[in-house]
Image (cartoon, rainbow, N blue to C red):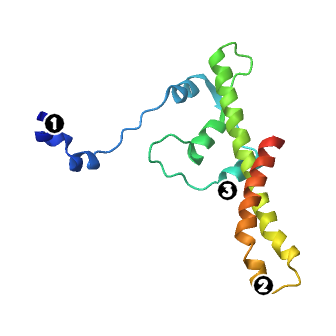
Amino acid sequence: WLKSKCHLHSKAFLSVMPKLVVPSDVTIAEERFNVGKQKLSWMQALGLMGMAPTLHLAYNRNDTKDMRAVLTKKYDAMSANPIVEILMTRQESIRKQVVAHNFMWVGVAVGVALPFWSFRKYDWKAKAIPIPFIAYGGAWGGGIVGGIAL
C-alpha cells in the first residue's frame, strides 16, 4: 500500500532520474597497475575508426573510447601480480577484437565487388539485387577469418 501511495516509486519520477555509472573493479585495477602509455598500431587505429558508435542502454559493452583507453595502457610485463596478467590478457583480447574488425570490412568490400564481377555482362539492376545479401555474408566471413587469423 505504501509503495503505491509514495511518489518516489512512480514511473514518472523514475524515468527522469539519471543513471549513475561507477567504475568497475577492472577499471580501477587498470588505473592502479598502469605504468605508462603506449601508441596504437595502425591496424588498431583503423579498427577503432571502423566501429559504429555504441548505444549504451545498460552499460554492458565497451565502446570505442573504452577500447582505446584499454589499448593505450602499458603494464609491467615482469610483474608477478596475477591481476596484471588478467589485465594484459584482457588487453590482448580487445586488441584481437579491434584488429579483426578490419577483416570484417574487407569481407564487406569483397561481398560488394563479387556481384559486379559475377554479373559483369548483365544490367546494373541485376548487380544491385544481390549486393546487400552477399555483402552481409562477406561481413560475417571476414569477421570469422579475422578471428581465426589472429
Position of the N terminus, as image quadrant, is top left
**Label 2, residues with CA under 10 Å away: few <14, some 14-19, many ≥20:** few
Label disc, if present, on residue 50 of the rendered structure: 3
Q: Nearer the viewer, mark 2 or mark 3?
A: 2
Q: Which residue is mark 2?
A: 124
* Residue 88: x %, y % from top left: 69, 27
Label 1 or label 3, whichever lies nearer to me, is 1
Q: Position of residue 106 (x, y in %)?
A: 79, 58
Which image quadrant for residue 128? bottom right
Q: Quadrant of the C terminus?
A: top right
Compute the Cα span from label 2 to label 3. Answer: 28 Å
Q: Residue at x 56, y 54 (%)?
A: 53
Three-letter amino acid code of the residue under disc 1: Lys
Q: Which label is found at residue 3? A: 1
Q: Residue at x 70, y 16 (%)?
A: 79
Quick check: 67 left or right of 136?
left
Residue 74 location (% of width, % of height): 68, 30
The kind of residue tagged 3 is Gly
Nearest to the observer: residue 148 or residue 49: 148
What amino acid is found at the position of numbered circle 2 in the picture? Trp
- In the image, taking residue 31 as reference, residue 145 lies left or right, namely right
Residue 112, image quadrant: bottom right
* Residue found 75% across the figure and 62% down from its top: 108
Image side of residue 86 versus residue 24, left or right: right
